[in-house]
Image: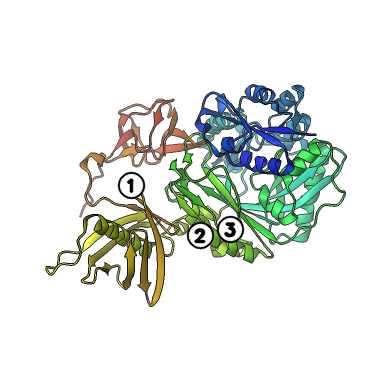
Amino acid sequence: MISRLLVANRGEIACRVFRTCRDLGVSTVAVYSDADAGALHVREADAAVRLPGAAPSETYLRGDLIVKAALAAGADAVHPGYGFLSENADFARTVIDAGLVWIGPPPAAIEAMASKTRAKELLGIEPLDPARVAESDLPVLVKAAAGGGGRGMRIVRELAQLAGELESASAEAASAFGDGEVFVEPYVEDGRHVEVQLLCDAHGTVWALGTRDCSLQRRHQKVIEEAPAPGLPAALEASLLDTAVRAAKAVGYVGAGTVEFLVADGRAHFLEMNTRLQVEHPVTEEVYGVDLVALQLAVAEGAKLPPETPAPRGHAIEARLYAEDPARGWAPQTGALRLFDVPAGVRLDTGYASGDAIGVHYDPMIAKLTVHAPTRDGAVRKLARALERTRIHGPVTNRDLLVASLRHPEYTAVEALDTGFYDRNLPALTTAPEGAEPAAVAAALAAASARRGRFGGGWRNLRSQDETRTYGGTGGDHEVRYRPTRDGGYEVTAPEGVRVVAAAPDRVSLETAGVVSHFDVTAYEDGTVHVGGHRLTARPRFTDPREQTAPGSLLAPMPGTVVRVADGLAVGDAVTAGQPLLWLEAMKMEHRVTAPASGTLTALHAAPGRQVEVGALLAVVQAEERPEAQS
């Protein structure tokens, strides 16, 4: 009987496991790095043990320290969560050898399936030999043998890039999972990513808890997931379930696991088996009415599953809310999460609360929002509206993208679901969301009202020039022009067609085309203004000369660590547009910095291991002069 459980992980998954433990009456132990000392999962645990350091390699990837922490805290079981050491057979053995209960499959099953290369060998699928990849094999996918989440994964379309991408993927995989092994396989263009959730006990019972569709992905990492996978032919779905069950039985699997496939042209291509709980498990829980974490603990205690798999009901959709800017290459964002409030009726899985800081050391996911409804259309509508109503004050997030994605005709029309969704639609999805312009008007009038309250002032007989304020947001800048009126109100002169009904520092009412809308406004000292669901940034009226940078300057798009500089790169070298110059690592992802134009490298301030803040000058490329066109 498990009485005290340590979660060998952090953030959202640790909090999620703790929630079930509280329901079951199991006490909890957290581990934390120095960067996580004040994190939500530490605050929610009954006890916590420090892992000195900040980097994953020093903390959450140190199995010896985690087992030592479990013993010191009096835990009798360890749950690995996902990521980090969750698919590490040696860690599982260390836990078991220490006399602790391992909440996961037997180490032998992890070894058989956790390595994607060995899993493919078990099923008779041979990866490509990197030394023998030819032009005719392209495109190919370089992939980490351990772990998941899109880390250590690269698409290669040109043979000359293969060696560099192998090195880059290996470095990223070693950083994220402590294992730099990578392999190469054919890349299937724009298929559907479909997976099967398994739960197995130690008595031979295997539950196949239906399918999930996880096709909406960025950088090979899932963004929106749903269950069941819609629109699958019955025969194909039956084949997926059968293959997943056979794979589990072949290795004597016990616990929760997932078998992933890429579906294209009516055929299913095996990708991998994840020998752990998946990030997207909530959609399966909502459809089948189960608690997979509770069942993991029961199976680990030796319980028998009922012989019949529970019956599914309705449809569930989950969206991952990330601190990132989709319009700037999905660049991760950091800073204080000043307010985070999700409307009722939504399942929230998160590792953050209002007032927490989003740092640079780990994945930028803030939360997962999941809804359930009788139909897919109902779930889509419910989640999109819930995201719109969610209040998130702080760093830039992908919230607007999630709403636009859920309402995009390619998503609502199931036939168009595939992993190329964002490659095709990202520019359209990152334009200004509906209502951005009136939100900017509300921000300007709220600011004017706040100034009036502090300093007085108002309408004068001698009419002065209009006041002008500019706000930046998703899709670009919005300029607002207005003037005070005789009655103490305001008149908006641009954009046209807006009448001010009421204006206060925290709430503005506007009428457009006969419709009155109300806007709650919160402004912060750094110039960020949140108007309803819109995040705006007040632009300065005059440019500070100190903020000007030389043409061709490459600035760090996010805080992080320089992990690599292109071999032999030196000041004075000729570079070509798009050429990779250096690599930054932030939030467990590697980001490539490329030359903005062809020319000469005139400055290089980056070196491996250097910590940089957002906006730091990394390098300067002086563009080559083009001869004037002859008339």
Label 1 secondary element:
loop
Give 570 or 618, whichever is nearer the viewer. Answer: 618
Residue drawn 83% across the image and 40% down it: 201
Give 352 or 579, whichever is nearer the viewer. Answer: 352
The reply to whether dot 1 and dot 3 touch (C-beta < 8 Å) is no
Give, as a three-letter code, the residue at label 2: Arg
Label 2 secondary element:
helix
Between disc 2 and disc 3, the foreground one is 3
* Residue 369: percent from left, percent from top: 59, 53
Q: Considering the image in quadrants, where does the C terminus appear? A: bottom left
Query: Can the viewer see residue 137 in this picture?
Result: yes
Give, as a three-letter code, the residue at label 3: Ala
Gap between marks 1 and 2 measured at Cα: 24 Å
Give 109 or 185, whichever is nearer the viewer. Answer: 109
Q: Mark 2: few, some, or many residues within 10 Å (few <14, many ≥20)?
A: some
Q: Mark 3: few, some, or many residues within 10 Å (few <14, many ≥20)?
A: few
Label 3 secondary element:
loop
For residue 156, side relative to residue 615 (left or right): right
Mark 1, residue position? 525
Quarter occupied by residue 473: bottom left
* Residue 606: percent from left, percent from top: 37, 28
Gap between marks 2 and 3 measured at Cα: 10 Å
Considering only order in the chain, which callout, 2 or 1, is on the residue closer to the N terminus?
2
Mark 3, residue position? 344
* Residue 421: percent from left, percent from top: 55, 55
Q: Which mark is residue 389?
A: 2
Q: Considering the image in quadrants, where does the N terminus appear? A: top right
Gap between marks 1 and 3 measured at Cα: 30 Å
Residue drawn 13% across the image and 70% down it: 461
